[in-house]
Image (cartoon, coloured by chain):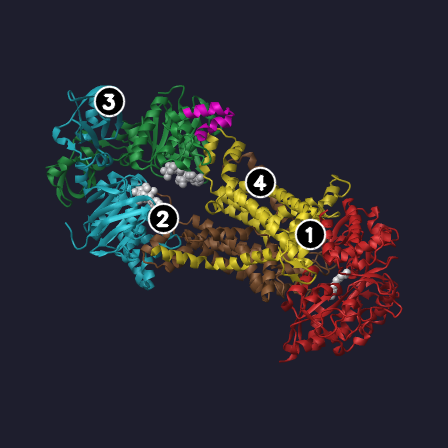
Chain colours: A cyan, B brown, C red, D yellow, E green
């Protein structure tokens, strides 16, 4: 589904000396979508993002946006904008001047650029604090300002590197809703790096899972969650067990595993309370630990304790064959 | 308030003694600068007066304190500005890897540790051999830079070690050119440390003796002048000078702190949500 | 170009680089004289290595011996010096009076003349081309604190008298210090010098040995290098006997502390200073410099210096600028008839007092040696370093 | 491509520093080195190649004596400035709680440094002299009945002046390093049962080493290169290498001065070179 | 349920100048239990923990452990040990020496203390890396070392201030299982500060929720989750909606809310995909947004889109009346 406004990575590679941080990846991001780049620490997410932004040189390959190769352009001429993990707000400038910064660099006169800055501050609901310095803002407020500053350049693609990781969990959930809302309102592509799968699932139209410098799987969130291509993706997305049946590896969702009167014999090894659900971990012979996720009612009506022998069962249709 | 451990009081006393030790001579100078007109450089006091402060502004029997002060002040400012500019540039250079950076770094360290008199001697010899005129604003200036620049550069290392690169990336992202990034982002952020570099540069220059000794030329800088003056009968005038300098520094530091305080107050007007989970 | 736009740069030690002189030059001659005061090391330095940094060098004769060969100075045509004939004999023939014998050391006249304008070696007698125009000189001796010593002092030997252990001092300018040492050693009868102003290595070694011994025994409280150090040492009572300069004695006395410039039976160690012209001086500046020198010798400065206890190279002209009382006290060695004050107005003596050492002729007639640069200077310097480090 | 550009920019930015150092550091050192092989008379330097200066230098017992004295001054000053500097930095860094107060007290320590070193040295004299304040005070308290002679014009007064002049050069880098120590480490130490003293020895001192090294470099070079303090405060009765050089200079013995200077420079560079092996200055600042 | 080995806070108060960080709290922690101290930023969790550890002086009140008042004792004599958020490993000491540090302070000889240190490193599975410096360890490894170091003092109570917050989500889940295992094996009290409710629920025998310097509610995890005392607790624990019925505030679990053919009329305002479940947010008149949590199957078989009118229903028994 290619359009004229795609962001395309062609054979994109990044080397730092001998380490290959990004290994010849190819991907087309649809315009106007919310994409989450997901993967464990060190898999090359930031490197990819920073190459797209122009803060890291491309070792090999190309980056195409709306058809033109932007990989040699300076960051500001690429049609991208970046929001940094720690926000990187200029500490010596007021909120308003931070947002107006790019206009000032372009030589836009003061009233015009301030008017525009205020407009964006309205958008992120920060207009009343326009005169403050970044140090006088809470984390959530700083995040909004950083967003406004990135958006003032009217980018086609907004790049966000772990934008929520500096916030406490409560705030994180609130701010992710705002990100989603903004993306929908503006209709531009958001490319959001995270290593939280819940964040990715909640936000993304498309999830791109990276591992070991390559893209392991990409697709709509639901597709990636429900049909993980590899064992790595299955484990990393969470909510899955990997079981070996007839020498084949399969993923089965934890909420599809039942404690039944017959099935795979196993022993309960751990119980984790999750509020409205309970995760029961059981060890079956020749398998890695298998988690059965059950509602609290079901769990407490059953009185299951560690050490207890149980049988694990699932509907055959819920088994998903893994490719690697 | 937390209860203080006993070591706090012991150390406070130690610190107080240290300050007293530091200020001892300054205080001695301070007291003796109020000698009566008959008084000398040593105790006992012979009367109390402002005579020597008055005398300080008259012509002395020998030497030209104010001329030397003007020169030292001008030289101090020259050195200060140059130190700031050159250190910042070099500091920026050292953030990238460039061929020769290691060598330049060790040269800088050598410049720091080389005994001052050698610079004085060497620069004097060179100018002599090349038939150039030594002058405080040329040879003297250059010699002092070999002392202030290493300090400036070390401070810049400290500053840039703590400088978050993402500020620059953010600026580039916002369309700032390399120069605009430095002008509108890097320099303003490191400005407070530059004040430190500037003060350091000025003080080191203002007080430099050995490196200027053989490189100042026809006209003395203040330390040389003070030393030259001691070849005639000296009076508490030089103490009055010391006292005034100290008072002047106190004033500058006071003004500095006051400005910082006022600015903090002004900023606080807008309130703060820092640290709040909103 | 007008003369009042001319600026001449003079440097020297604080002893004679007086601002009052510059002020007076401006009044009398119209041009500007910029004075830079340096310590004696820096003076030698600058004369020898920085010819462009000055127009007029105010240096001592023994320094001249080192500096002249560098070619940084130009000889002066004595025919342009109005009062040349009135300059005291010491600086011309070497003899104070026709009968005087010439003392040891670098006597001023021996480095005072060269063969011609470009001459590089010193001439034996007057040639009409002078290296330095003499300006100021004196006969130096030991200064003492009579109140703290309480008995007469009459010989250089007293400097090493254990009685003054930890209370004696000499100066740490090797060329001068060695001469004081020699005076002491000779007076003690330990060494007889061929020429104190030009010692052999053995003589240097012996002299140093004696003083090193004394130093190790704690004879000396300190050595001094600047004028003002000597004043402070004496005034504060750190030291009661030391080599000293005349105005330093004056400075101690003016604080109301008794101090005597003690004439000694072995005689004085003398020195002389003069003005030299930079090689690069030409044209109107050179004319102005001559004008300045002529003015210097015309009496006002002489009077000024004499009132500090120094002597003027042309005493006759200075007399016109001094009162009868001052002339009698400072030059003739007579008792003061009225208070004697310094040029800055400090009272130095009351009516009835006489200056230490008597008249000009008594003092300058008893010179035993002049400050000198020896042939073995480099050796001496190294020995001096050794002495200081011991 | 981009790399070449970066390199050129780097060079351009480093150019002013490089030029200053070439002109006023490298050239003088080279000159001194060359001149050290020359000969001198009273009044001129004779360009000729000769080891005479070095032969004399290494042949003279004074050289060794004076170098030893220089090391002794350097060592003693280092020991005292370190002890005092460390304590002061420790107090400011760990016992003063508000940052404002830390800055204020720190500035308080820097003010005397605005007064000329010479004036600061001279002013010890009325304090330490035979009839100075110290002696008079002690005598009036009856602690002594004879003035203490060694207060002035002695090694004591020389070291005192050095300590006075240079302690701040120790305080600053140590303070800087201490401020970068994570406070949690101290709590962790206490939590593990370390007493205040044990925390000091086992945690703070090891972590402050870089600052100590940098301060050490400052103080050692300042003291080893000094020639004026020793003269002033010992009443010219003691010598260090700097004085040897300055005496030679004042008597126009440039080649001899240069030879001594070359040896001094090598000594200092070796000492500092050794210290630099223990600390990466660029990283630790 | 008081025993001889309780940790008890009596009227414990902490003031910093005018701010009250901890306001006269009273609580008894049962020995050998895993307690999570939960609450929003700035509510006083760290202050409480640090007073117990002895790193902060007690302004008022007392701390009693096994019956003796420890509030004036030095940290090492309290029978507590602390594990710091950033681990605070001594950077100049090897892993082994870090762990042996407290023994060294006591003057234990080298072989003995190293043997003991290795024993603890075995426990946390770090023995092979005993010679490394902390800077050569990953975050998770550092965490284990910090744990070993804290445990070497054989504390009755281990205090942990956000021990997992520096780890990435993947690792965080693994490490929390290890914490739980260790606590069970050692049988001592763990007092663990966090602001993640999922962490608290998964780990805690007892959850203590703080807010505004006081304890808002304390009890077994399930009790706190299922029967929040106040609106604050309900919201903070997550998984709950707060609805107003007849002027009364009630909590109702999100997984108890159904989209039905009749019930409270509302409009769907947002949809958040969570992998095996989907959170549908709907706005009903006079109510705050209400979230219905449904399985993905249920959601996708229904085709619900934002803006669509729905009815919200729940079983009356699932309503829980809030006290404030
Ligand atoms: N400037 C650099 N120099 C050398 N290696 C680097 C550099 N930046 C990153 N790397 C290496 O490249 C690899 C990918 O790093 P990258 O920062 O892209 O990972 P990431 O996925 O963003 O990880 P994280 O989740 O920890 O942020 C890692 O092995 C990292 O160590
Ligand atoms: N040293 C201190 N001086 C002054 N106020 C402090 C100090 N430490 C904490 N406070 C204040 O006390 C209150 C409670 O702080 P505390 O650190 O206990 O919160 P917390 O619950 O641990 O928060 P967080 O989740 O952000 O760590 C806060 O308002 C904080 O600003
Ligand atoms: N004009 C030169 C005067 C130099 C004075 N030197 C004094 C030396 C006395 N021995
Ligand atoms: Mg990253
Ligand atoms: Mg906390």
Q: Is residue A36 above or below residue E177?
A: below
Is E233 or C47 nearer to us in this picture?
Answer: C47
Residue contact between numbered discs 4 and 3, judged by CB atoms under 8 Å:
no
Residue that sits furthest to the front in the current view: D49
Task: Check disc 3 and report the residue beneath it.
Answer: A268
Task: Indicate which label's residue lies in the foreground, 2 or 1.
Answer: 1
User: Does mark 4's beta carbon lie closer than 8 Å to ligand 2?
Assistant: no
Task: Indicate which label's residue lies in the foreground, 3 or 1.
Answer: 1
How far apart are labels 4 and 1 at the CA level? Answer: 32 Å
Drawn side of residue A286 relative to residue C167, left or right: left
Task: Indicate which label's residue lies in the foreground, 4 or 3.
Answer: 3
Circle 2 SS class: loop
Marks 2/1 same chain: no
- On whether residue E99 falls in the magenta region, the answer is yes
Chain part drawn in magenta: E96-118
Please tell me the numbered disc located at residue C35. Answer: none
Q: Position of residue E130 (x, y in %)?
A: 41, 30
Characterize the local packing of mark 1: few (<14), some (14-19) or many (20 or more) Cα atoms within 10 angstroms. Answer: many
User: Does mark 3's beta carbon lie closer than 8 Å to ligand 1?
Assistant: no
Would you say residue B149 is visible in this rendering? yes
Q: Is residue C54 above or below residue B264?
A: below
**Quadrant of image for the C terminus of chain E:** top left
How far apart are labels 3 and 2 at the CA level? Answer: 48 Å
Task: Check disc 2 and report the residue beneath it.
Answer: A137
Q: Earlier in the sequence, mark 3 or mark 2?
A: 2
Marks 4/1 same chain: no
Residue contact between numbered discs 3 and 2, judged by CB atoms under 8 Å:
no
């Amino acid at each position: 589904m290619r359009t004229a406004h795609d962001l395309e990575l062609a054979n994109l590679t990044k080397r730092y000396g001998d380490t290959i941080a990004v290994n010849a990846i190819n991907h087309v991001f649809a315009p106007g979508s919310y994409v989450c780049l997901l993967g464990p620490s060190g898999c090359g997410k930031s490197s990819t993002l920073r190459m797209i932004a122009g803060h890291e040189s491309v070792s090999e390959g190309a980056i195409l946006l709306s058809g033109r190769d932007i990989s040699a352009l300076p960051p500001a001429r690429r049609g991208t904008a970046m929001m940094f993990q720690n926000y990187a707000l200029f500490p010596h400038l007021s909120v308003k001047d931070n947002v107006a910064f790019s206009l000032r660099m372009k030589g836009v006169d003061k009233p015009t650029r301030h008017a525009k800055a205020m407009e964006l501050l309205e958008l992120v609901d920060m207009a009343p604090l326009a005169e403050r310095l970044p140090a006088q803002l809470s984390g959530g407020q700083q995040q909004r300002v950083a967003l406004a500053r990135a958006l003032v350049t009217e980018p086609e693609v907004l790049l966000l590197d772990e934008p929520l990781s500096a916030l406490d969990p409560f705030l994180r959930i609130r701010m992710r809703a705002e990100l989603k809302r903004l993306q929908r309102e503006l209709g531009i592509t958001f490319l959001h790096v995270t290593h939280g799968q819940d964040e990715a699932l909640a936000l993304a139209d498309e999830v791109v899972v990276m591992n070991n410098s390559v893209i392991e799987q990409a697709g709509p969130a639901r597709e990636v969650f429900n049909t993980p291509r590899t064992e790595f993706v299955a484990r990393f997305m969470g909510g899955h067990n990997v079981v070996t049946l007839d020498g084949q590896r399969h993923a089965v969702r934890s909420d599809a595993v039942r404690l039944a009167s017959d099935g795979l014999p196993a022993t309960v090894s751990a119980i984790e309370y999750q509020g409205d659900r309970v995760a029961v971990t059981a060890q079956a012979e020749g398998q890695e630990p298998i988690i059965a996720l059950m509602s609290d009612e079901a769990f407490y009506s059953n009185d299951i304790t560690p050490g207890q022998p149980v049988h694990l069962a699932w509907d055959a249709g819920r088994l998903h064959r893994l490719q690697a | 308030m937390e209860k203080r451990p006993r070591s706090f009081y012991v150390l406070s006393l130690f610190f107080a003694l240290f300050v007293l030790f530091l200020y001892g001579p300054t205080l001695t100078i301070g007291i003796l600068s109020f000698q009566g007109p008959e008084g000398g450089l040593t105790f006992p006091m012979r009367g109390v007066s402002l005579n020597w402060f008055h005398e300080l502004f008259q012509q002395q029997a020998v030497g030209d304190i104010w001329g030397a002060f003007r020169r030292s002040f001008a030289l101090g400012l020259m050195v200060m500005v140059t130190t700031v500019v050159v250190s910042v540039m070099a500091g920026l250079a050292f953030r990238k890897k460039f061929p020769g950076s290691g060598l330049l770094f060790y040269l800088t360290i050598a410049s720091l540790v080389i005994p001052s008199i050698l610079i004085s001697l060497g620069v004097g010899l060179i100018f002599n051999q090349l038939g150039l005129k030594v002058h405080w604003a040329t040879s003297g200036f250059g010699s002092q830079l070999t002392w202030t620049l290493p300090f400036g550069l070390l401070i810049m290392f400290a500053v840039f070690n703590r400088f978050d690169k993402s500020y620059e990336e953010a600026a580039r992202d916002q369309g700032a050119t390399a120069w605009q990034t430095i002008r509108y982002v890097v320099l303003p952020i490191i400005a407070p440390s530059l004040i430190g570099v500037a003060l350091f540069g000025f003080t080191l220059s203002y007080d430099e003796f050995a490196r200027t000794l053989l490189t100042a030329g026809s006209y003395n800088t203040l330390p040389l002048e003070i030393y030259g003056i001691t070849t005639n009968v000296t009076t508490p005038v030089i103490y009055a000078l010391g006292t005034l300098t100290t008072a002047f520094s106190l004033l500058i530091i006071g003004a500095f702190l006051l400005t910082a305080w006022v600015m903090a107050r002004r900023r606080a007007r807008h309130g703060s949500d820092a640290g709040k989970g909103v | 170009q007008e003369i009042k736009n001319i600026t001449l740069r003079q440097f020297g030690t604080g002893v004679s680089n007086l601002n009052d002189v510059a002020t007076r030059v401006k009044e009398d001659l119209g041009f500007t004289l910029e004075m830079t005061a340096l310590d004696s090391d820096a003076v030698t330095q600058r004369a020898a290595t920085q010819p462009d940094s000055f127009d007029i060098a105010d240096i001592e004769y023994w320094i001249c011996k080192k500096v002249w060969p560098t070619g940084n100075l130009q000889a002066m045509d004595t025919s342009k010096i109005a009062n040349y004939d009135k300059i005291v004999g010491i600086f011309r023939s070497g003899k104070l009076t026709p009968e005087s014998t010439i003392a040891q050391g670098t006597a001023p006249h021996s480095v005072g003349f060269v063969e011609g304008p470009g001459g590089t070696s010193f001439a034996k007698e007057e040639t009409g081309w002078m290296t330095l125009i003499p300006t100021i000189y004196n006969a130096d001796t030991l200064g003492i604190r009579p109140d703290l010593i309480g008995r007469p002092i009459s010989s250089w030997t007293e400097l090493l008298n254990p009685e003054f252990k930890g209370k004696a001092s000499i100066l740490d300018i090797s060329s001068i210090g060695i001469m004081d040492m020699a005076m002491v050693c000779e007076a003690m009868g330990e060494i007889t010098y061929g020429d104190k102003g030009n010692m052999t290595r053995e003589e240097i070694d012996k002299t140093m040995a004696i003083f090193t011994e004394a130093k190790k025994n704690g004879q000396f409280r300190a050595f001094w290098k600047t004028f003002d150090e000597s004043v402070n040492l004496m005034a504060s009572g750190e030291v009661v006997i030391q080599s000293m300069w005349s105005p330093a004695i004056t400075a101690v006395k003016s604080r109301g502390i008794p101090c005597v410039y003690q004439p000694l039976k072995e005689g004085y160690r003398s020195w002389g200073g003069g003005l030299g012209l930079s090689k690069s001086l030409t044209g109107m500046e050179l004319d102005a410099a001559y004008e300045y020198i002529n003015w210097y010798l015309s009496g006002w400065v002489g009077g000024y210096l004499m009132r500090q206890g120094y002597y003027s190279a042309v005493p006759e002209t200075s007399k016109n600028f001094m009162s009868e009382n001052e002339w009698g006290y400072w030059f003739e060695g007579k008792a003061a008839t009225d208070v004697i004050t310094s040029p800055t107005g400090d009272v130095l003596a009351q009516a009835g007092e006489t200056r230490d050492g008597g008249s000009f002729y008594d003092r300058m007639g008893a010179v035993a040696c002049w400050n000198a640069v020896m042939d073995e200077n480099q050796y001496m310097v190294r020995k001096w370093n050794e002495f200081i480090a011991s | 491509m981009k790399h070449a550009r970066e390199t050129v920019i780097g060079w351009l930015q480093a150019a002013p520093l490089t030029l200053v150092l070439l002109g006023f550091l490298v050239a003088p050192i080279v000159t001194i080195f060359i001149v050290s092989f020359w000969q001198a008379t009273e009044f001129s330097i004779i360009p000729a190649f000769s080891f005479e200066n070095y032969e004399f230098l290494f042949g003279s017992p004074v050289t060794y004596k004076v170098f030893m004295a220089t090391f002794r001054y350097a060592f003693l000053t280092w020991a005292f400035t370190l002890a005092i500097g460390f304590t002061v930095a420790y107090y400011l860094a760990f016992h003063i709680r508000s940052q404002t107060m830390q800055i204020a007290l720190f500035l308080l320590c820097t003010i005397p440094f605005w007064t000329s070193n010479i004036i600061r040295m001279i002013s010890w004299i009325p304090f330490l002299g035979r009839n100075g304040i110290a002696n008079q005070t002690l005598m009036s308290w009856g602690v002594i009945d004879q003035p203490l002679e060694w207060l002035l014009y002695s090694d004591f007064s020389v070291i005192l002046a050095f300590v006075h002049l240079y302690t701040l050069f120790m305080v600053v880098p140590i303070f800087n390093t201490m401020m970068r120590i994570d406070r949690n480490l101290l709590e962790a130490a206490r939590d593990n049962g370390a007493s205040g003293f044990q925390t000091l020895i086992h945690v703070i001192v090891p972590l402050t080493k870089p600052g100590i090294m940098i301060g050490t470099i400052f103080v050692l070079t300042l003291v080893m290169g000094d020639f004026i303090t020793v003269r002033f405060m010992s009443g010219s009765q003691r010598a260090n290498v700097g004085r040897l050089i300055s005496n030679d200079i004042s008597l126009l013995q440039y080649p001899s001065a240069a030879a001594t200077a070359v040896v001094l420079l090598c000594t200092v560079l070796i000492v500092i070179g050794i210290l630099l092996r223990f600390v990466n200055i660029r990283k630790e600042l």
